Image (spheres, grey):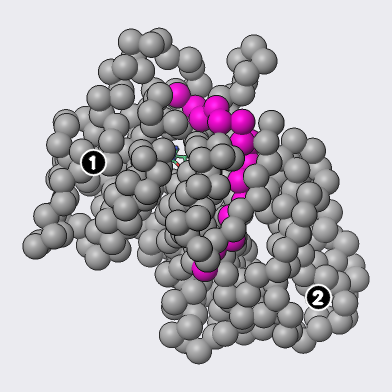
Amino acid sequence: MGIFLTASGNDSAERSCILLFAKALAKASAMGGLMVVLGCQAQPQVFRDTRVLMGTYVEVVSDNRDAARIVFDEIKRVEGLLSKYDPQSEVSQFNEFGRLSAGPDLYHLLTKAKEYWFATDGAFDITVGPAMDLWGFTTKDFRRPSDAEIADVLKLIGTNKIIFHPSNNVVEFNVPGMEIDLGSIGKGYAVDCAVKALRRAGISNCLINAGGQVYGLGTKAGKPWRVAIKDPRGGEVKNSFDISDQSAATSGDYEQYFVEGDKRFSHIIDPRTGSPADSGVISATVIAADGLTADFLATSLVVLGKRKGMELLKRFPDSRAQFIEQ
Ligand code: ADP
Ligand code: MG
């Protein structure tokens, strides 16, 4: 996901501006999405750091030197719970055994995911894992499955097939072979956890960009954080907006996809068909009060398309969205 980091606060301000701009541009033009625009004018000291976590670049900008460490530690903790690629994570254990006594983070996330499944009439569904595997998105060995294979996989999909035991936080799959995949909300949740940790530490200004999942805590030297949307098919900026104590997330068909013939197959699956979403929306950007809501809505809007997506947004009054259609 693209990000412009052009903040400065030292002697080599102008040089670092240009360098970062060039680096960010190379990345942004390859991937499209959200950028954070920080401006190059003189300003109080800004601390910046980047780490690869949850399979993406996590960038932190703050006027507090401890912010980045706090953010990275917290995101690492959440990654340890949710990663599909770590066999010890709670998500992997649940997928392997079909039953788990979930910790408070995962239990909370699963409860929210069920709520979102109902709110979207099944368009948002964390049990799309088997369809992701079938189309080759998990291994990057992309293929177009047969109708029979898709029909088989659809039997394993449905968040309503997860059984919840609230008395002891045990969750289990109703159908053997089901899998959960929290790729659509994991980063949004991790960012929210990081923001809580920052607040606990008394830090009130910080920008976090976890691969296009952005949270702007407080302000940048008294002004809201500025985020820009890039054209997913081109390089230019489409629009920009300001956030303060808000999150922005973008989802689109340009993050992971393969092309066959003249058709593009993306990593966002329509759980009702078991195939990549084909709603006409190629990118949706959502601003919401928290990262989890923004992340869930952005994914859902790509599946639902603009008309049904606008209906869904009415149920989340603190949220607004921008759609880019084909
Ligand atoms: P990004 O990967 O850019 O953060 P998203 O937040 O839209 O993008 O998440 C996409 C991921 O969500 C996919 O890689 C997959 O793991 C999962 N996913 C795909 N389709 C759905 C869906 N309909 N509902 C919920 N999760 C989905
Ligand atoms: Mg999402």
Rendered residue at 73%/84% (across/down): 221
Q: Which residue is mark 1?
A: 160
Answer with the quarter of the image where residue 240 lies. bottom right
Work out how far the residue at label 2 is from the one at label 1, CA to CA, in angstroms: 49 Å
Q: Is disc 2 placed on a helix, strand or loop? A: loop
Which sits in the foreground, 122 or 82?
122
Q: Is 276 contained in the magenta span?
A: yes
What span is in magenta? 275-289
**Total numbered circles:** 2
Q: Which residue is mark 2?
A: 8
Image quarter of the C terminus: top right
Answer with the quarter of the image where residue 133 lies. top left
Which sits in the foreground, 117 or 276?
117
Residue 165 versus residue 277 in the image, above or below = below
Label the magenta part by its dominant secondary structure.
Answer: strand
Q: What is the x, y in percent for residue 22?
A: 84, 54
Residues marked 2 and 1 touching at CB (< 8 Å): no
Taking the image as shown, residue 128 lies to the left or right of residue 214, namely left
Identified by mark 1, the residue type is Asn
